[in-house]
Image: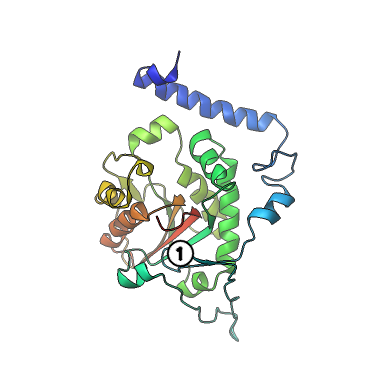
Amino acid sequence: MDRRFAPRPMRVVLSQVRALAVRVVALALPNRCALCGNLSHTVMCSACDAAYWNEARLRCDVCAVPLGAGQPRPRRARGRHGGAGSASAYRCDACRATPPPFDATLALADYRAPLDGLARGLKFHARLALGAEFAARLAQRIDDTDAMHAAGRFDVIAPVPLSRGRLVARGYNQAWAIARPLARRLGVRADAALLARVTETAPQSRLDRRARRDNVQAAFVAAGDLTGCHVALVDDVMTSGATLAAAANALKAAGAARVTNLVALRTARD
């Protein structure tokens, strides 16, 4: 049966069976590099790691939009007592003119080929090992970044939630596949239920920038009192920033003192 014409309950079951099958196959077959397909002991081989993950990139500290290529950030300076020195602040014109509700964003790399295939593999093909890979790289980048040290330790790490219908259909939340192992690496509490998506929204990828903002404006609510908390908000890809802004608004409304976005990939300003 063509999955496109199956009844919705059957489509959900087929999606869950497919996700399970992908996991079983991944365990049974030899590990191959997620980018080039060559045999590898790690998720990505050393050649692809060197080729695609080490580009020096200057980004806005607030939204992580690329500011220029080939401009490395200054290394963290240590004080006499081992603390981080003052971090230089970089902000794009848009964040200077209209500061978003979140306070900072850390992104691993640009959303472009071939790395965009990793995000799609995690999101649509249940390649959950990629979530752990993104988490490991985010943990290392946090440790290497001046602004992250200057901002202080996270109190809780939370994923951007899916709607209930989308979560049931997909069988997992790709943001949680990153957030959970990241929290373990950082020794910080992870909470998949810290935010709830209370409205079914259209896929953001189908909308222009203004429509994306309107689509998710009141999509989230926070569970409980977050007064004084520094919340790390995790997602796989940041495009316009509308989803993360709406989520940050909900967290700030619940009392969060600071919201830092941690994303695997970031698109250029659209």
Image position of 197 (left or right of 174): left
Image position of 63 (left or right of 87): left
Q: Pointer 1: residues within 10 angstroms few (<14), some, or many (20+)?
A: many
Q: Position of residue 111 (x, y in %)?
A: 51, 51
Image quadrant in which the C terminus is located: bottom left
The answer, for residue 51, to whether it is visible in the render is yes
Label 1 is placed on what type of residue?
Phe
Q: Secondary structure at mark 1?
A: loop
- From this view, report whether residue 64 is shown above or below residue 25: below
Colouring:
rainbow
Q: Front-most of 17 and 57?
A: 57
Image quadrant in which the N terminus is located: top left
User: Which residue of the protein is positioned furthest toward the bottom in this rendering?
Assistant: 80
Residue located at (74% from left, 42% from top) = 40
Q: Front-most of 195 and 73?
A: 73
Residue located at (36% from left, 20% from top) = 9
Q: Position of residue 45 (x, y in %)?
A: 72, 47
Image-quadrant location for residue 118 = top right
- From this view, report whether residue 2 is shown above or below residue 110: above
Residue that numbered label 1 is attached to:
154
Q: Position of residue 255 (x, y in %)?
A: 29, 64
Q: Position of residue 180 (x, y in %)?
A: 51, 49
The answer, for residue 222, to whether it is visible in the render is no
Q: Front-most of 161 and 69?
A: 69
